[in-house]
Image: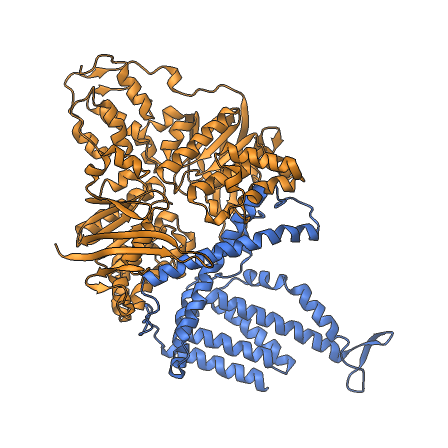
């Protein structure tokens, strides 16, 4: 792997068009499904229900034909951090009649409840990460944009300009790879003139010293790019605010309703039980 | 013909925060009729882009009025209608893509117009089919070539059903094939009755228009036919422009071929030459017309391959089993269509990328994971394609001193070396050292980029598309600098799709296609073979194309001619004129 491929480290736009039954569902149904699931996973109190949620997410992985391997990569990076948090959970409870002591050092005690809490928190985070990556594997940017546009349209009655909000998302998605490219170019230009990019065995301090001079020109070029883009949008009639229409027509079918109802029921069950 | 745009005594100054406004246009008046094909020419900074942006109400004049289809641009309520009727393709392909897929990007304009979904879908399909991008509609713009992006940009405008399309240097960032593609599209637009206004630095392109508007320092200096402009040598010079190269060379051949009138492009040249009944034979040209080099190798590549994003789903092989070598003291050209791997290969030579397989030797260095990259990068300097990305300091002086400061050079020596480097590229030290880098013109930015590399005194200099996007004068200056740098005994590797430039500079060239080396040959052999180059989406230098036509018509000029002087020299060997 080369040191200059910054775009690779951006985990956006991982859409995997496997064309499964799940992929073909209405984007609004999918967006709401992921929203419900994430709420349920975050707020569920019962450890078994968190485990159940993890299974459900894994089942959707199967239905959507998303290879499991690609999901594991997403877990690998934050895993040390998760273990770190879970570690503190181990010591959270004091031993009692209902909570047998397992191990103790000085005044620190590891109890059954502690182990359970640590396990739950790891599971909760893993399920959340998997749900998010599943969303990025099954929702194309176009799904997100047109789905949200349709879902947020009611906000317009409250005089909240939801369309501008959607445009911000769209531009952001478009801009990220461009920023990656700009950063790459600037880093290369500095490397070519003697900065130590790509040189092995640098201390942390040296690494930070490398990054700072890239940031300022990166912002400058992105501002320039943003200006050109704004001009291009203007030239194509953006901002007339009359009534923007949509290229994609979303049709909510019976199957979509079915999926959404199932997602809602499951999420409520995870929350309540 | 119906009146489309009416420009009446327009003046405009760019607002400068915290300073006096910068005047850009002065008292400009003209009219544009429906169905016209107009080229706007002028040197860098003459106000072409500013003028164009007035024509579709992106800018509003300070004084004077502009009416588009009778709608005054001063009135904001007219803007949506004006934007719909007058579309614009911008210079930089990337930044005008707004959505994350091609079809949605094309739909952006019609969506803004609030059209019904069915109608939008139909228009997107029609316009993408017209530019030949319908098959790729779901791809993301970032994975397209610059030429493809310009096609999509055009489709996005066509979907709004405009009366007029403005091309603002839309071909500047494209390779010759991409450029031909845009010109073909312009031809189609003309036939369907759409008015075309194009801003261009390529005089050959401008000569295709029915009418040329010439700008110089914000005033309209010329409004007339291409013939009128280019045959008026004094006017062309005073506006800092160049004649089309075909005209330039053809005029010098007139004494021998009297049928030549003033051809502005290669098709006109072809028509003006009468076929000879008895072929006129020529002696081969003397070797001193060509630059020969028999030194030992400086760079040697054996079977190098490189894949971007290796081991990911987006993996993309850029180089495959590359074998080539560059002689010491050589100017070596890398040619090939966009995406053929030129830039990637060039970036291997100074260790920005390391070969994933094979061996690469650059001077005393074996390039691999063990190489001292800092030393290698001091040995080989690199000037990148887009100067906007490689200038990162605020002041020019600091920019050029950057590499030296990293080496720990300070004080008088630093100052002296910066000064020398600036003088080398023709920038005056006192006037330029404290100027802001972003305020420079395109040509000046390239000079600064060149100076900031030369200051490190590299033995091998790598240049990626050194003349892309420059006006003819700036281009000639940069080429002159490169010749001078070479005469000082440095070796150069130049990647370019402007074969004209390589014809003047290089002794050998390597042709790449889809990440593979097609051939490495003497420049005059490879660049003079137009049909061969065309097969790999390249276009031979004008002089070679003219030589090809002359041979067809019975003037058997030598086959290895690649620059105009050689063509003229060949005719001079005939001695007596009018044979």
What residue do we see at 49% from left, 69% from top?
A135
Number of marks present in the image shown: 0
> Which quarter shows the C terminus of chain A?
bottom right
State which quadrant residue B348 falls in.
top right
What residue do we see at 22% from left, 47% from top?
B187
- Asked whether, in this view, residue A19 is left or right of residue B399, the answer is left
Image: B435 above or below B251: below
* Residue B319 in view in this figure: no
Q: Which chain does blue denote in the image?
A: A
Which residue is situated farthest in the front direction here?
Answer: B20
For this rendering, which residue is in front, A121 or A189? A189
Image: B79 above or below A104: above
For this rendering, which residue is in front, B490 or A177? B490
Colour convention of the picture: by chain
What residue do we see at 55% from left, 84% from top?
A269
Residue B486 image offset from top left, x and y in percent? 49, 27
Residue B479 image offset from top left, x and y in percent? 42, 32
* Residue A121 in view in this figure: yes
Image: B475 above or below B30: above
Residue B266 image offset from top left, x and y in percent? 24, 33
State which quadrant residue B117 falls in.
bottom left
Q: Which chain does orange denote in the image?
A: B
Residue B373 image offset from top left, x and y in percent? 63, 38
Which residue is situated farthest in the right direction here?
Answer: A106
Image: A116 above or below B193: below
- Asked whether, in this view, residue B267 is left or right of residue B286, the answer is left
């Amino acid at each position: 792997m080369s040191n200059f491929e910054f775009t690779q480290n951006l985990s956006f736009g991982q859409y995997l068009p496997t064309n499964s039954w799940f992929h073909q569902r209405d984007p609004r149904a999918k967006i709401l499904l992921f929203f419900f699931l994430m709420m349920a996973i975050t707020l569920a109190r019962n450890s078994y229900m968190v485990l159940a949620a993890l299974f459900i997410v894994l089942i959707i992985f199967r239905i959507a034909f998303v290879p499991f391997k690609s999901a594991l990569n997403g877990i690998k990076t934050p895993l040390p951090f998760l273990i770190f948090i879970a570690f503190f959970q181990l010591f959270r409870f004091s031993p009692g009649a209902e909570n047998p002591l397992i191990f103790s050092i000085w005044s620190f005690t590891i109890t059954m409840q502690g182990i359970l809490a640590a396990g739950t928190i790891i599971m909760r985070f893993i399920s959340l990460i998997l749900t998010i990556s599943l969303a990025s594997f099954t929702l194309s940017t176009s799904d997100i944009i047109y789905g949200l546009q349709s879902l947020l349209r009611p906000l317009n009655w409250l005089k909240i300009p939801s369309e501008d909000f959607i445009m911000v998302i769209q531009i952001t998605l478009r801009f990220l790879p461009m920023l990656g490219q700009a950063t790459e170019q600037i880093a290369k230009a500095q490397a070519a003139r003697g900065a130590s990019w790509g040189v092995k065995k640098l201390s942390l301090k040296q690494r930070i010293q490398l990054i700072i001079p890239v940031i300022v020109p990166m912002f400058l070029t992105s501002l320039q790019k943003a200006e050109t883009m704004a001009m291009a949008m203007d030239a194509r009639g953006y901002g007339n605010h009359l009534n923007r229409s949509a290229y994609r027509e979303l049709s909510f079918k019976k199957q979509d309703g079915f999926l959404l109802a199932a997602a809602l029921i499951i999420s409520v069950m995870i929350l309540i039980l | 013909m119906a009146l489309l745009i009416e420009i009446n005594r327009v003046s405009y100054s760019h607002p400068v925060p915290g300073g006096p406004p910068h005047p850009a246009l002065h008292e400009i008046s003209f009219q544009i009729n429906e169905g016209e094909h107009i080229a706007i020419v002028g040197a860098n900074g003459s106000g072409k882009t500013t003028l164009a942006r007035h024509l579709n109400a992106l800018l509003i004049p300070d004084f004077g009025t502009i009416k588009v289809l009778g709608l005054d641009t001063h009135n904001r309520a007219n803007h949506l209608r004006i934007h719909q009727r007058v579309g614009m393709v911008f210079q930089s392909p990337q930044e005008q893509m707004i959505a994350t897929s091609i079809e949605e990007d094309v739909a952006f304009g019609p969506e803004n117009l609030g059209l019904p979904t069915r109608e939008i879908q139909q228009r997107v399909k029609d316009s993408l089919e017209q530019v030949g991008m319908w098959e790729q509609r779901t791809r993301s713009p970032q994975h397209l070539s610059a030429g493809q992006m310009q096609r999509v940009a055009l489709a996005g405008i066509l979907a709004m059903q405009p009366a007029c399309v403005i091309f603002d240097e839309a071909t500047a960032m494209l390779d010759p094939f991409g450029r031909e593609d845009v010109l073909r599209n312009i031809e189609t637009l003309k036939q369907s009755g759409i008015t075309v206004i194009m801003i261009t630095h390529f005089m050959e392109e401008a000569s295709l228009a029915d009418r040329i508007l010439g700008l110089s320092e914000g005033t309209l200096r010329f409004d007339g036919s291409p013939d009128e402009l280019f045959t008026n040598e004094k006017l062309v010079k005073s506006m800092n422009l160049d004649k089309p190269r075909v005209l330039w060379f053809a005029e010098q051949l007139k004494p021998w071929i009297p049928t030549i009138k003033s051809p502005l492009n290669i098709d006109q040249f072809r028509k003006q030459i009468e076929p000879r009944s008895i072929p006129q034979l020529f002696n081969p040209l003397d070797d001193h017309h060509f630059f020969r080099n028999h030194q030992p190798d400086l760079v040697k590549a054996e079977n190098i391959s490189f894949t971007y994003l290796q081991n990911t789903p987006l993996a993309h092989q850029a180089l495959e089993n590359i074998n080539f070598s560059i002689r010491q003291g050589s100017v070596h050209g890398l040619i090939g269509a966009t995406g053929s791997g030129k830039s990637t290969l060039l970036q291997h030579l100074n260790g920005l990328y390391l070969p994933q397989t094979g061996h690469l030797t650059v001077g005393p260095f074996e390039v691999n994971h063990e190489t001292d990259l800092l030393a290698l990068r001091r040995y080989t300097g690199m000037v990148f394609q887009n100067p906007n990305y490689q200038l990162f300091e605020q002041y020019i002086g600091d920019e050029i001193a950057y590499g030296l400061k990293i080496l720990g050079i300070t004080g008088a020596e630093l100052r002296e070396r910066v000064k020398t480097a600036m003088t080398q590229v023709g920038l005056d030290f006192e006037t330029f050292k404290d100027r802001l880098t972003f305020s420079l013109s395109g040509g000046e930015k390239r000079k600064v980029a060149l100076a900031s590399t030369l200051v490190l005194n590299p033995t091998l200099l790598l240049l990626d598309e050194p003349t892309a996007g420059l006006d003819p004068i700036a281009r000639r200056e940069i080429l002159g600098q490169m010749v001078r740098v070479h005469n000082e005994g440095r070796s150069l590797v130049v990647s370019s799709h402007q074969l004209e430039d390589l014809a003047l500079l290089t002794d050998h060239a390597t042709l790449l296609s889809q990440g593979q080396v097609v051939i490495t040959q003497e420049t005059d052999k490879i660049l003079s073979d137009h049909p061969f180059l065309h097969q790999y989406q390249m276009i031979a230098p004008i002089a070679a194309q003219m030589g090809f036509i002359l041979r067809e018509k019975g003037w058997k000029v030598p086959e290895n001619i690649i620059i105009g002087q050689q063509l003229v020299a060949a005719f001079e060997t005939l001695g007596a004129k009018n044979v």
